[in-house]
Image (tube, grey):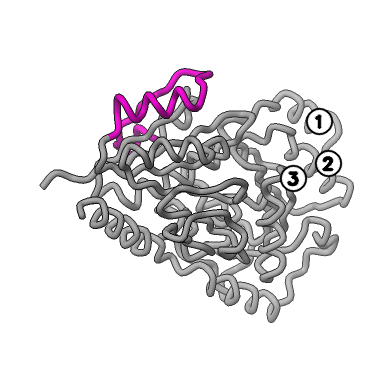
Amino acid sequence: MEQRRVFFRADGHQQMGLGHVVRSLALAEMLMDEYEITFVSRAPIASLKRQIQELGVELVELPWPVDKMEEVRLLCEDYLKEEDIVVIDGYHFTTEYQSCIKNKGCKLVAIDDIHAYLFKADVVINHALGINRDDYNLGPETQLKLGTAFCLIRKEIRSATRRTPEQSVGESILLCCGGSDPKNDSLRILKQLADWEINRPIHLVLGAAYGDRTELEAYLAKKSKLDLTIHKDLSADSLVNIFQRCPMAILPPSTIAYEYLSIGGLLFLEVIADNQIRMFESFVKYGLARPLSDFPRSLEINTNSWRKLLQHQATYFDGQQQARFKQIFAELSVATVV
């Protein structure tokens, strides 16, 4: 029997960041055994193009720039069929864009975290905590899949061993400001840690689209006394290794924070983009992380508090997302056939 087709539409670059593509690829990986996957992206950077190709799915590269409505008409005319399922992840896929896909007869899934406009999708996925239907403008038939039960995390991280209280907590701190870090927040936070005279090893993870390496290296060469190791464009397996070595992390409230919490650890959050504010508030409210402003000058970890924190985080991250997403898409496939 011919596999049903699922088209993913997401972009990533230095200004936008890489999160939309990374989490879309995580979902694509969960579905690829049962569906024919095609990934559609505007001029993907080399690292993202490699990740898509390594997953073994077809890549359609769109030119840049292209008017978004011209783009969606092209997709509907040249690529999509009525029985296809389309997954969109990006803030520019607004109501009008969604309407074109729905008018084609396709089922539509939207990955979203800002609920900024009317959604025409059949399913909206938002893995933030504290969101409910009242936060959205959508039709009565749209399903909402909300919270960490639907977090989009890569296979290597979903299957990794969670940190336990019995494990050595180690000495190292992880710092990462996402795949692009357009405002060079990595350097700003490193300067803050230096001012606080933090003397533990720090592992700085830079994404594939990071563009300020010269300024960073100039600072480290002249002024910094930090014990720092820099990693660039890590594979998922290598990132898991860093997560497991670092019982503390400083991260933005974005996809990488979900990935770190799925392993477990003492997480401090720094908002580096406006769309992260709601996620920041929910992580702090639910006791999964703390603001960077709470970062302790003394880094002693209380054993009892550490145990409770890891147990609490584990209740939100059970690693069973793949089964849930397969069920969602199976229901969409049945509805499409009918």
Disc 1 to disc 3, how far (Cα)? 13 Å
For mark 3, what is the residue? 227
- Distance between mark 2 and mark 1 Cα atoms: 9 Å
Is residue 308 rendered to the left or right of residue 124? Answer: right
Residue 57 part of the magenta segment: yes
Quadrant occupied by the C terminus? bottom left
Q: Secondary structure at mark 1?
A: helix
Whether residues under marks 2 and 3 lie with C-beta atoms below 8 angstroms apart, the answer is no
Question: Considering only vertical position in the picture, is 209 above or below 259?
Answer: above
What x and y, as percent, mark residue 210? Answer: 63, 31
Sequence-wise, which precedes: disc 1 or disc 3?
1
Inspect the image, locate mark 3, and give the three-letter code of the amino acid beneath it.
Asp
Q: CA distance from mark 2 to mark 3?
A: 13 Å
State yes or no: discs 2 and 1 in contact (Cβ < 8 Å). yes
Q: Does residue 329 appear to the left or right of 245 in the view shown?
A: left
Which residue range is magenta in the image? 52-80
The type of residue carrying mark 2 is Lys
List x then y, in percent, for residue 156.
42, 53
> Label for residue 191?
2
Task: Single out the mark in the foreground, 2 or 3.
Answer: 2
Looking at the image, tell me whether mark 2 or mark 3 is earlier in sequence order.
2
Taking the spot 80% from the left edge, 52% from the top edge, the residue there is 199
- Residue 206 vs residue 33, the one in the foreground: 33
Whole-percent x and y of residue 33? 24, 50
- Whether 230 is drawn above or below 35: the answer is above
Residue matched to label 1: 219
